[in-house]
Amino acid sequence: MTYMLEWFQLPNSFENTAWLSQIQQGMAIKYAVEHWRRTMPRGMGTLYWQLNDCWPVASWSSLDSLGKWKGLHYMAKHFFAPTLLSAVEDLDAQTITLHVTHDVPDSREGIVSWQIITANKGDVVQAGKMDCQFQGPASLEVGTIDLADALAKHDVRNLLVRMWLEVSDEMVSTNLVHLSRPKHVMLADPELKCSISKSGDTAVITINAARPAMWAWLEFDGSAHGLSDNFFHLFPGDEKVVTFKTDLSAAELNDQLKISSLWDTFSTR
């Protein structure tokens, strides 16, 4: 709880304390793994402790004793991806440096896009693109974002920087930089909405947000297992599609589905 309250607002329930602990763990290990991956070739691999549990217990594993995924495991799917876009913020210099870590032994060309947006509404303050070429296995700095104008006009607590890497028109990596600790970010109710459909035994969930949602997660009857993605960031104008296998009908899923985000862990509505 000491560490949690250094970074996040006091959770509003026991249930959200448990969920927030998963977000906190995932954020901490993501931050470390991204750093270590950027140090290639000084460091050429990273493992985190621990993967799984052999019996039911509250622990720091990313898989529970039944093999169910916790928040960290969903996040690891992204920060351990073969091609990773990551960033290092320097508020003293008012810059963010962008890095691509590529573990595959080939050469590729891509486009890195970025937006500085307001945290409370999702309005775009500044945006840009940069071409990049990278050959792996290696990690390289691909460009710098100047934050000076945005910081001169906006409260640092109300700024988020989102970025994504496309290769051959395919989105291969996304990331987000918050310029203040999450407990200070000026989030508002994201008004998350979703629709559910079925294709055979696969459920397709489409989620939208009216305002930025940090670490949005889906759960069914208290479980967040078996989803194609979870604990993701969502922004106005975007759609997030999550799939998973189930025998339940779309109507049954709709009755059981609960969608939350960081805002819900501290909001009193």
Image: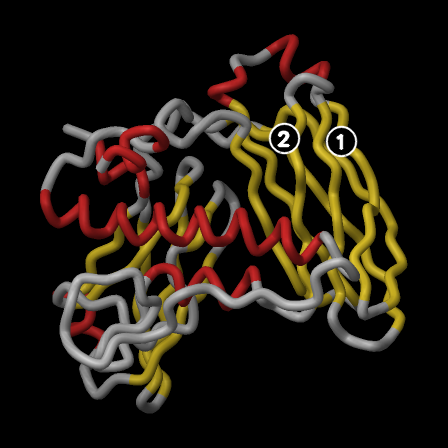
Instruction: Write down the quadrant of residue 73 in the picture.
Output: bottom left
The reply, left or right, for residue 32 in relation to residue 113 is left
Residue under pointer 1: 145
Which mark, residue 16? none
Which mark, residue 116? 2
Mark 1 neighbour class, 10 Å CA radius: few under 14, some 14 to 19, many 20 or more: many
Q: Position of residue 78 (x, y in %)?
A: 54, 63
Q: Is residue 19 above or below residue 126?
A: below
- Between 148 and 36, the one lying in front of the other is 36
Q: Tag 1: residue type?
A: Ile
Are the two marked residues, 1 and 2, in contact with CB atoms closer than 8 angstroms? Answer: yes
Instruction: Write down the quadrant of residue 125 in the picture.
Output: top right
Quarter holding the C terminus?
top left
- Between 102 and 262, the one lying in front of the other is 102
Q: Report helix, strand or loop for mark 2.
A: strand
Q: Is residue 238 above or below residue 58?
A: above
- The residue sitting at 20% across, 68% down in the picture is 223
- The residue sitting at 57% across, 37% down in the picture is 177
Which residue ends up furthest to the left in the rendered image? 14
- Between 50 and 207, the one lying in front of the other is 50
